[in-house]
Image (spheres, rainbow, N blue to C red):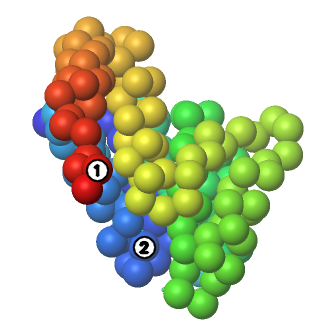
């Protein structure tokens, strides 16, 4: 399977949440690779990874980080591929609001598509990456349409909660 999405996280401690990115992409048969590369602790490695990503066939980067979450923005500075950012709640942080502010407040010129904090953001980053890839891949587009239809059906079929 071709690797089309690069998933980068600032620390191994981010994997619990960021694993939902690759698990969601798997459902659509989209190949991804995972890397732990801190923007602060391994800046040269991050630059090298992002600068070579397009030539290696990567089409979208999904970056998750907590605390002063520079990772998605620095990744976007090193590639013109679309970069999706997932702010994470770090154990010693401010509940993820610190990371959200860092990821969403990019200066004009270097965009990062910022998702929600934590697991919802990780899942939606994968779904947004899927929608981007679906623009040029009818198989992925059909799989995404089917996913949305089945999600809707789940709601339609759901019995109402007991009222007693
Ligand atoms: C960030 O600092 C990482 O993305 C992680 O969310 C946070 C804490 O990292 P560790 O101290 O767990 O390595 O760079």
For residue 113, the mark is none
Looking at the image, residue 62 lies above or below residue 99: above
Please tell me which residue is depicted at 69% across the width and 68% down the height of the picture: 97
Please tell me which residue is depicted at 44% across the width and 52% down the height of the picture: 120
Q: Nearer the viewer, mark 1 or mark 2?
A: 1
Give the residue number, with chain letter if any, for mark 2.
14
145 relative position to 106: left or right = left
Where residue 10 sits in the image (x, y, percent)?
51, 71
Q: Is mark 2 within 8 Å of ligand 1?
A: yes
Where residue 142 sits in the image (x, y, percent)?
23, 13
Say which element carries label 1. Answer: loop
Distance of label 1 from label 2 (alpha carbons): 40 Å
Can I make out residue 48 in this image? no
Give the quadrant of residue 39: bottom right
Give the quadrant of residue 103: bottom right
Can I make out residue 24 in this image? yes
Q: Is mark 1 within 8 Å of ligand 1?
A: no
**Screen quadrant of the N terminus:** top left
Which residue occupies the foreground of this view, 161 or 75? 161
Which residue occupies the foreground of this view, 29 or 80? 29
Give the quadrant of residue 26: top left
Where residue 137 sits in the image (x, y, percent)?
29, 14
Question: In the current view of this chain or complex, which residue is farthest to the front?
Answer: 164
Looking at the image, residue 16 lies above or below residue 54: below
Give the residue number, with chain letter if any, for mark 1.
163
Please tell me which residue is depicted at 68% across the width and 80% down the height of the picture: 94
Question: In the current view of this chain or complex, which residue is farthest to the right?
Answer: 108
């Amino acid at each position: 399977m071709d690797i089309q999405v690069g998933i980068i996280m600032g620390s191994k401690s981010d994997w619990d949440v960021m694993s939902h990115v690759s698990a969601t992409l798997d459902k659509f048969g989209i190949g991804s690779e995972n890397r732990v590369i801190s923007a602060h602790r391994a800046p040269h490695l991050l630059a090298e990874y992002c600068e070579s990503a397009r030539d290696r066939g990567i089409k979208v980067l999904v970056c998750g980080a907590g605390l002063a979450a520079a990772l998605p923005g620095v990744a976007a500075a090193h590639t013109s591929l679309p970069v999706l950012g997932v702010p994470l709640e770090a154990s010693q942080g401010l509940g993820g609001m610190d990371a959200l502010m860092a990821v969403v407040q990019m200066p004009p010129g270097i965009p990062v598509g910022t998702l929600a904090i934590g697991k919802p953001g990780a899942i939606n980053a994968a779904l947004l990456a899927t929608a981007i890839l679906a623009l040029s891949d009818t198989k992925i587009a059909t799989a995404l349409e089917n996913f949305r239809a089945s999600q809707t059906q789940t709601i339609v079929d759901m019995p109402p909660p007991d009222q007693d």
